[in-house]
C-alpha cells in the first residue's frame, strides 16, 4: 500500500449562494516518490496540500472518503494527534514562508524548536545541528543569520529557513508548496538536491507544488495537472512536453524561453474552462 | 533623461552594511533588471529608492532630483513599488476594495468605482474577489492585488520586486504582457528584480547582476541569447538556468 492514500477530497467555503467547492473530488496516492503538482493560480493546489495535513481553517470545510497516511486513518485523528504527526512525520513548507514564521522569535530558535519536538538532544548538539542545516540550504554566515528575526532576512532566506525547519525532523512525507520560488537558480538547485537526497536516502515521499513546469519535470517522477479544483491530467515527468490536455499545452506555451522571439506570450482562453 | 540614477550607493541596516558601492542608471522608458544571488541586496536597493531603507550613503536621483530620505506624497505618485512578499504587504483586515481605494483617497482621485473595476479586470481578477480579505485568496491572486494597488496611481516609475515569482505561468504571461503593454502605452520605467532569466529577457533591455552586496556585471539582456558574460558568477547563473538550450 502507498504511504498516502487520498480519495475524493473536497474543500468548500461558504458564500452568499451556499457552499462553493474549490477542491472538487481529488484522489491520489503517493509512495516513496516525488509527485509534482502544477496548475493555474487558484486551482486548489495549496488547499489540497493543507487538507492532507488537516489544516483547513474555518469557515472552510473538508471532506474525503479516505485519507490514510502509513496505515493511519487521519480523518479520525484528534487535533492533538495530528499536531504530533505534523511535528514529526508529516511536514509542509508553506507558500508564504515569512508569514508562517513566528515574527518575534529568532530564526535559529525556531529551527531548534522543530528539532527538539522530534529528538532529545543536548543544547550544544541542537545548536550544531541548526547551523549545519542552515549551511546545507546555503545560508552564508549561518551563525549570524540564526540570530536574526524573520523581518531581517531576505525573501529567499526566509524560504530556506522554512525548508530547514521542515527537513530537520526528517519527515516521512514532505509537502512543499512553491518551496523555491524566491531562490536564484543556483541556490534553488542546491535546495532541491537536498530534498531529493531525503527521498533517495531516507525514502521520504515528496509532494512538490510548483508553477515552474521545467523544475517539476526535472525533479519529479510523476506530475498531476490541476485546474479549477480538479486533476485534468496525469503523466510521467519526462512526458510533460508531450501532454495532451489543451490546458496543459496552454501552460507549456506560456513559459518564456531563454531565447524568446515572441513579443507577447500566449495566454489561456479561460472561457474554455470553468474558473474557481 | 534618466528616470533613476544611483551612484556609489552603500546601504546598511543598523551597523551592518549589506550593499556596497552600487552604481547604475535607468533611462526614462527603459526596463532594467536586477538579478543575482538570494540575499545579495536586490530588495534592499529597491527599498532605498523607495525610502523604506534609510541607512544609505552615496547618491540616488529620481527623474533628475536627489531622493530624500523621507516619504513624500509627490514621490508616491511618481514611483510605486510592488513588494516581494505579497501577503506581508497587504493589510490583513482590509478588503481588496479598500486596499485598492486607499491610494485614490489619499491622493484625492475620483471615479474610484470604475478605476477599481478596470484595474481588477486588467490584472485578471474576477470582480467577485473585490470584497474578500487577503487570506481568502490564493498566493497568486494576492500578488495580482499587490500589482493592481501599485498601478492605481498610474506612476511613471515602477519598482517591481519579483512581481511574478508567486504566479503560475499562465497568470505570469498575462501580467508580463500587461506590464509590457502599459510600458509601451505610457512610457513607464521599470526597475525589476527577478531570478528568472527568461522573464528578464522578455521584459528588460539591460540587467545588473548582484552577488554579496555588489554589482558584478551590467549587460544587455541580448547576451542571454548567446551566453557571453564577463563575470564567472553570471555564467554560473546562466548555466544553472539551462543556458540557451
Ligand atoms: N478562506 C477562503 N475563503 C474563500 N475562498 C478561498 C479561501 N482560501 C482560498 N480560497 C479560494 O480557493 C481557491 C483555491 O485556492 P488555493 O490557495 O488552493 O490555490 P492555489 O492553486 O494554491 O493557487 P496559487 O498558485 O495562486 O497559490 C482560490 O480560488 C481561492 O480564492
Ligand atoms: N531589516 C533588516 N535588518 C537587518 N538586515 C536585513 C534587513 N533586511 C534585509 N537584511 C539583510 O540584508 C541582506 C540583503 O537582503 P535583501 O532582502 O536585499 O536580499 P535580496 O537580494 O532581495 O534576496 P532574495 O532574492 O532572497 O529576496 C540579507 O543578508 C538580509 O539578511
Ligand atoms: Mg497556492
Ligand atoms: Mg528580495
Image (spheres, coloured by chain):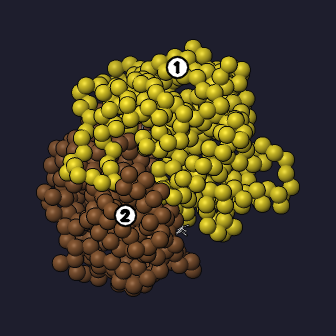
Q: Secondary structure at mark 1?
A: strand
**Contact between labelled residues 2 and 1, with CB atoms less than 8 Å apart:** no
Q: Residue at x 62, y 44 (%)?
A: A196
* Ligand 1 located in image quadrant: top left
Q: Spot the brown chain and give its letter.
A: B
Is B21 left or right of B32, judged from the image as shown?
right
Q: Position of residue B63 (x, y in %)?
A: 22, 76
Q: Position of residue A253 (x, y in %)?
A: 30, 39
Vertical comparison of A251 with A113: above or below: above
Q: Secondary structure at mark 2?
A: loop
User: Which of the two marks, 1 or 2, is nearer to us in this view?
Assistant: 2
**Mark 2 beta carbon near ligand 2 (under 8 Å):** no
Q: Which residue is mark 1?
A: A27
Chain under numbered label 1: A
Q: Residue at x 22, y 49 (%)?
A: A262
Residue furthest top in the image: A65
Q: Which residue is mark 2?
A: B227
Residue B132 appears in view: no
Q: Position of residue A32 (x, y in %)?
A: 65, 31
Amino acid at each position: 500500500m502507498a504511504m498516502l492514500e487520498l480519495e475524493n477530497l473536497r474543500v468548500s467555503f461558504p458564500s452568499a449562494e451556499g457552499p462553493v467547492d474549490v477542491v472538487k473530488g481529488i484522489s491520489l496516492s503517493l509512495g516513496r516518490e516525488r509527485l509534482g503538482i502544477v496548475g493555474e493560480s487558484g486551482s486548489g493546489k495549496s488547499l489540497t496540500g493543507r487538507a492532507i495535513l488537516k489544516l483547513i481553517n474555518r469557515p472552510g470545510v473538508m471532506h474525503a472518503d479516505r485519507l490514510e497516511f502509513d496505515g493511519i486513518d487521519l480523518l479520525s485523528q484528534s487535533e492533538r494527534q495530528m499536531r504530533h504527526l505534523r511535528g514529526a512525520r508529516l511536514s509542509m513548507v508553506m507558500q508564504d514562508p515569512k508569514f508562517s514564521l513566528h515574527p518575534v522569535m529568532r530564526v535559529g530558535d525556531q529551527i531548534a524548536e522543530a528539532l527538539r519536538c522530534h529528538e532529545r538532544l543536548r543544547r550544544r548538539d541542537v545548536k550544531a545541528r541548526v547551523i549545519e542545516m542552515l549551511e546545507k540550504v546555503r545560508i552564508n554566515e549561518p551563525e549570524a543569520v540564526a540570530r536574526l528575526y524573520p523581518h531581517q532576512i531576505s525573501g529567499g532566506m526566509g524560504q530556506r529557513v522554512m525548508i530547514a525547519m521542515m527537513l530537520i525532523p526528517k519527515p516521512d512525507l514532505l509537502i512543499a508548496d512553491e518551496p523555491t520560488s524566491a531562490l536564484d537558480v543556483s541556490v534553488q538547485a542546491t535546495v532541491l538536491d537536498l530534498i531529493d537526497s531525503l527521498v533517495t536516502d531516507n525514502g521520504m515521499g515528496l509532494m512538490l507544488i510548483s508553477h515552474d513546469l521545467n523544475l517539476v519535470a526535472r525533479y519529479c517522477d510523476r506530475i498531476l495537472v490541476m485546474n479549477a479544483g480538479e486533476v485534468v491530467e496525469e503523466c510521467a515527468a519526462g512526458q510533460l512536453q508531450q501532454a495532451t490536455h489543451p490546458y496543459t499545452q496552454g501552460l507549456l506555451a506560456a513559459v518564456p524561453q531563454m531565447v524568446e522571439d515572441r513579443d507577447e506570450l500566449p495566454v489561456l482562453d479561460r472561457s474554455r474552462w470553468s474558473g474557481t | 533623461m534618466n528616470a533613476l540614477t544611483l551612484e556609489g550607493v552603500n546601504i546598511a541596516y543598523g551597523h551592518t552594511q549589506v550593499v556596497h558601492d552600487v552604481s547604475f542608471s535607468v533611462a526614462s522608458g527603459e526596463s532594467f533588471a536586477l538579478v543575482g544571488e538570494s540575499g545579495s541586496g536586490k530588495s534592499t536597493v529597491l527599498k532605498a529608492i523607495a525610502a523604506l531603507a534609510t541607512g544609505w550613503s552615496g547618491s540616488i536621483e529620481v527623474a533628475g532630483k536627489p531622493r530624500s530620505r523621507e516619504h513624500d506624497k509627490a514621490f508616491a505618485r511618481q514611483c510605486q513599488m510592488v513588494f516581494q512578499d505579497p501577503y506581508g504587504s497587504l493589510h490583513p483586515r482590509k478588503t481588496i476594495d479598500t486596499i485598492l481605494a486607499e491610494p485614490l483617497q489619499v491622493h484625492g482621485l475620483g471615479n474610484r468605482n470604475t478605476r477599481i473595476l478596470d484595474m481588477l479586470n486588467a490584472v485578471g481578477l474576477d470582480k467577485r474577489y473585490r470584497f474578500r480579505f487577503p487570506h481568502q485568496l490564493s498566493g497568486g491572486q494576492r500578488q495580482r492585488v499587490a500589482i493592481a494597488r501599485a498601478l492605481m496611481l498610474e506612476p511613471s516609475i515602477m519598482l517591481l520586486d519579483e512581481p511574478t515569482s508567486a504566479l503560475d505561468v499562465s497568470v505570469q504571461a498575462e501580467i508580463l504582457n500587461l506590464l509590457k503593454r502599459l510600458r509601451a502605452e505610457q512610457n513607464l520605467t521599470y526597475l525589476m528584480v527577478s531570478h528568472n532569466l527568461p522573464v528578464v529577457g522578455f521584459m528588460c533591455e539591460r540587467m545588473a547582476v548582484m552577488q554579496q552586496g555588489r554589482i558584478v556585471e551590467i549587460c544587455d539582456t541580448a547576451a542571454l541569447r548567446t551566453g557571453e558574460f564577463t563575470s564567472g558568477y553570471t555564467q554560473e547563473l546562466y548555466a544553472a538556468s539551462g543556458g540557451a538550450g
